[in-house]
Amino acid sequence: MRSRAAHLALSAVAFAAILAAAVFIATSEQYVATSRTALRAFDAVVRETTSSVADFRGDAVAKSIGALRSMASTDKARESLDRAAAKTDNFTEIAAILDHVNAARLAEIESADTAEAATRKLEAVALTATAVVVFAVIVALVVLRPAAAEPAQMQLPATEAASGDDLVLRSSQETMAGYVTARPAGPVLRAASQLCTDLGRVSDVEELRQLIGRAADVMDASGLIVWMGTPDGSQLMPTLSHGYLPEIVSRFPPLSRSAENAAARSYRTSQIQIVLARPGESNGAIVAPVLSSQGCVGVLSAEIRGGGETSESVQALAAIFAAQLAGVLHSTPDAHEERRATGT
């Protein structure tokens, strides 16, 4: 019961965080739109004032400057307009009037740009905080899931005979859960959260490669490759890798979007794909889509040791790291340069 209540409480926290962020961003965008509308109205009156000055209409100029002063939102703009108004009685200084009016316009534009930049910064902080909360909730739900299953098994009567089917099912479940509980959740959670923090601050390609290696360690992956889509979206190209020799990765052919393999399917469907291990032959793999506002832009493929591809916690980690990479690969200047140089 406690586990169910904890799941509901954590889900409510995540929903509340997302809702609060959505309301804040909607309010911020409305403020920005109102500010831009006021700036366009100010520009319209500036143009009207300029036209009146050109036509030597003193009364119209004075009226327009008065309207501009009532619309001005900064002291600097109002001061410039006061100087312009002082020169309307003598139209021999037309250039000075126009200069003061233009100075007021520039002051309003600068003020609007500064306010919008501050608003965008607050929006970014709100989104980052929401992402951290949702990430923590997801990890907590993953950690609580196996813990909730143990009491149910302990409540079985000791004298109850188990059928052959029950034994087969229990053996399968214990194999899957054994991988999760073999690695303490606390250190994995700390490593994953620190990695996400470092991914948000990455500044160059070499540092990003090191973080990819750390992601592979957290997921217990023997190898990891980041495939990015070509500009036309028809192919996937290997962009970053860990655990494979560079000369081998360089010989990897482009993957067609229509190919019948896990990477291409994940790219087409924007869904995680699982490749089960073949005991004694090959490791399993997880392929997670790298999703951005433009859709799926690539995939993260990881070769997992010890049958860990069936673990929900490992699958969740792959999805989280792929989500982090979506923003990193589109915001790191060096990553842009490397993709431009390699055509990926």
Image: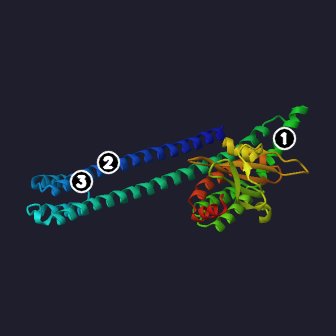
Write down the residue under mark 3: 47
Circle 2 sits in a helix, a strand or a loop, which is it?
helix
Is residue 64 left or right of 276 when viewed as pictured? Answer: left
> Mark 1 and mark 3: span between their CA atoms?
76 Å
Location of residue 208 by image quarter: bottom right
Between 45 and 306, the one lying in front of the other is: 45
Q: Nearer the viewer, mark 2 or mark 3?
A: 3
Write down the residue under mark 2: 37
x, y percent for residue 62: 12, 55
Counting residues from the start of the chain, the first of labels 2 and 1 encountered is 2
Is residue 29 left or right of 254 when viewed as pictured? Answer: left
> Mark 2 and mark 1: span between their CA atoms?
63 Å
Is residue 92 left or right of 166 when viewed as pictured? Answer: left
> Mark 2 and mark 3: span between their CA atoms?
16 Å
- Give the residue type at disc 3: Arg
Relative to residue 84, is residue 259 depicted above or below?
above
